[in-house]
Amino acid sequence: MSEKTPPDLNVTDEWAAAMEGQTVKDRVYEVATTLTSPTTVADIADRADCTKEGARSHLEWFVELGVLEKVAANPALFVRNEAYFEFRRVTELTREFETVEAIGDAIDAYRDRERELAAQFEATAPEAVVLSDVKSEDLDDTYDALSEWRAVTRRLRELHEAKLRLESGSSPAPASSLS
């Protein structure tokens, strides 16, 4: 049995290459979209390769837009506004599927997958799975399946919201008609 060697991943260089040539505002936004826990201006500035002063004005602007939440003032701590990103994902779904019927088909497919995962674990939700009952050699596969189940559940919630928007006629215009 041969050992598999993991691929040579250099995420730091990939991140640096992606950030190169971007404006400070763009770099701060890229960092802001990853803030899942309260983060200081200094940490954000370091990750965005800019000064604290350069980052601070953009961070405050992103708070005004609703992209970020300022969760503390001294020191200033920022975290991404999950509601904003969920709204964007739902908006993208309404544009992608365009009709209530198409979203209904997607909901059916995701619901089927959710039922398969629930049956696999004999549980009603990913949080109900007791990991101490899982054999250690099966943990990686179990974590992958639970991660998929959480993603499927989130996508179902977003698809239902997109369907409600389309049914109410409050969805944005398709991207092609905006020009």
Image (cartoon, helix red, strand yellow):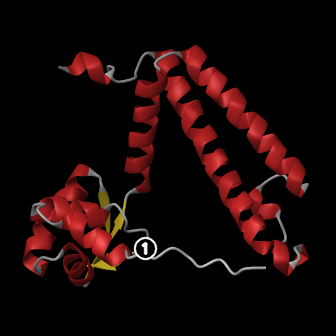
- Is 128 positioned to the left or the right of 45 in the image? right
Q: Which residue is mark 1?
A: 37
Q: Is residue 22 left or right of residue 98?
A: left
Residue at image position (57%, 33%) is: 159
- Kindly identify the residue that appears in the image at 66 percent across and 60 percent down: 147
| Residue appearing at x 40%, y 25% in the figure | 95
Q: Is residue 60 visible?
A: no
Position of the C terminus by quadrant: top left
User: Where residue 170 appears, x then y in whole percent?
Assistant: 40, 21
Where's residue 70, x and y in %? 29, 68
**Does residue 41 appear left or right of residue 171 in this picture?**
left
Helix, strand or loop for disc 1: loop
Q: Position of residue 134 (x, y in %)?
A: 87, 73
Instruction: Identify whether 34 is placed above or below 11.
Output: above
Local packing at callout 1 (Cα closer than 10 Å; few below 14, some 14-19, many 20+) is: few
Quarter of the image for residue 80 reads bottom left
Residue at horizontal 27 percent and vertical 19 percent from the top:
176
Q: In the image, residue 14 lies at what x, y percent?
A: 31, 69
Is residue 59 placed above or below 65 in the rendered structure?
below
Name the foreground residue: 171 vs 15: 15
* Number of callouts: 1
The residue closer to the viewer here, 8 or 13, is 8
- Examine the rendered structure and indicate whether residue 101 appears above or below residue 58: above
Q: Which image quarter holds the N terminus?
A: bottom right
Q: Quadrant of residue 27?
A: bottom left
**Is residue 4 visible in this depiction of the protein?**
yes
Type of amino acid at the residue the image marks with label 1:
Ser
Instruction: Describe residue 24's horizontal placement relative to residue 152 as left or right.
Output: left
